[in-house]
Amino acid sequence: MKIKSKIIKTLLIVIILQIQGCNNEKNEERNNNTTAVKNDTLVEYSLKNIPKNLDKYKNEALILGTFHFNRSTDGSDVVAQKHIDVTTQNSQADIELLVDKIVIEFKPTKIVVEWMPKFQKDFDSLFVEYKNGNWKLGKNEAFQIGFRVADRLGLSGVICIDNKPPQPETVTSVDDWEAYALDLGQKDLWKEYDDVNNVFNNYLDNLQDTLGLLDYLKVLNSHEVAARTKQFFFKGLVNLGHGDKYVGADLTGHWYRRNTRIFVNARNALENPNERLLIIYGNGHKWILEEMLKGSGEFEVRDVNTILK
């Protein structure tokens, strides 16, 4: 009997220890869950209480990406072989319709254009002459669209904000990009980049044969074209270089440098914290200026195609 009693006691002790172990595990799990909840609450609290940016700025921006209407002054890297004639009756009707939509749907308080500030006095004089009926609008989009919108809304004119910093020495030292890529053993990379971009540029080029001016601008200002244009700077070309000579990367950095200056000029053209800014610029600038405007937290960027419908 004594042996049985000892066995029973031993079994009871084992059972008790097992129960206590289970309870300890449950308590530990419960404590871990409680800690996780507390941590989640702390994270949510920390995120909720991040110091806010200045909230007095309630500006709106509308970026109208264009092809350059005046081909004789087109300084783009890629110049279309075909070109919509903006002086035809149909093109002029499209421009008037575009101006109507911008004036009615957006009502900009400031208009900035792709011209260097050194031309501002000339632009101011031309705008006065245009208003007085003494000057026929030139082909450039700054005149055809910017002057018309400014006149309709009673603004003092358009503001020249362009900037063209010198290219990095690493970039200017390359005379022949294909030869440079070959020397680096990156010819296939360069060819891949060059071929796919030529196909895209030719596609846009050919659309000018089939689309009117307004419809072509709708394509240029689409999200699809913006995404494709952005890829120019992050595929192929950007990789060309080696060691401490990052020629492709420096060229991409140069594009950011130029557009950051343009962004600053556009931002500083505003006089109040709740203005509506119309930016008329070559379409290649659209995606990067949009990123900067949104990133500043001071602008609501309107989708131009919702206005062009």
Image (spheres, rainbow, N blue to C red):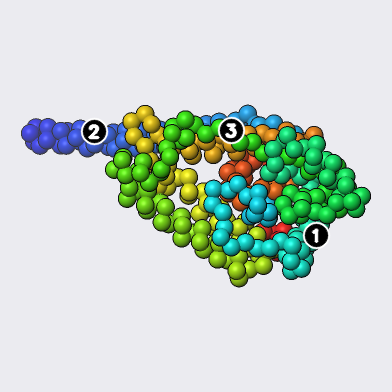
Residue 17's label in the rendered image is 2
Residue 23 visible to the viewer? no
Give percent across and percent down for residue 193.
Answer: 40, 51
Give percent across and percent down for residue 71.
Answer: 64, 54
- Dot 3, how many residues are within 10 Å of its Cα: few (below 14), some (14-19), or many (20+)? few
Q: State the residue at coordinates (58%, 48%).
A: 76
* Mark pair 1, 2: CA separation: 84 Å
Give percent across and percent down for residue 300.
Answer: 69, 45
* Mark pair 1, 3: CA separation: 35 Å
Looking at marks 2 and 3 on the same chain, the residue that comes earlier in the sequence is marked by: 2
Q: How many marks?
A: 3
Task: Tell me: 226 left or right of 171.
Answer: right
User: What secondary structure is marked by label 3?
Assistant: loop
Residue 54 visible to the viewer? yes
In the displayed structure, 193 sits above or below 275; it is below
Seen as rendered, the residue at the extreme bottom is 210
Looking at marks 1 and 2 on the same chain, the residue that comes earlier in the sequence is marked by: 2
* Mark pair 2, 3: CA separation: 78 Å
Residue 165's label in the rendered image is 3
Residue designated by label 1 = 100
Q: Nearer the viewer, residue 191 or 175?
A: 175
Q: State the residue at coordinates (51%, 48%).
A: 230
- Dot 2, how many residues are within 10 Å of its Cα: few (below 14), some (14-19), or many (20+)? few
The kind of residue on which mark 2 rests is: Leu
Q: Nearer the viewer, residue 167 or 94?
A: 167
Looking at marks 1 and 3 on the same chain, the residue that comes earlier in the sequence is marked by: 1
Q: Nearer the viewer, residue 254 or 54?
A: 254
Task: Tell me: 204 left or right of 102.
Answer: left
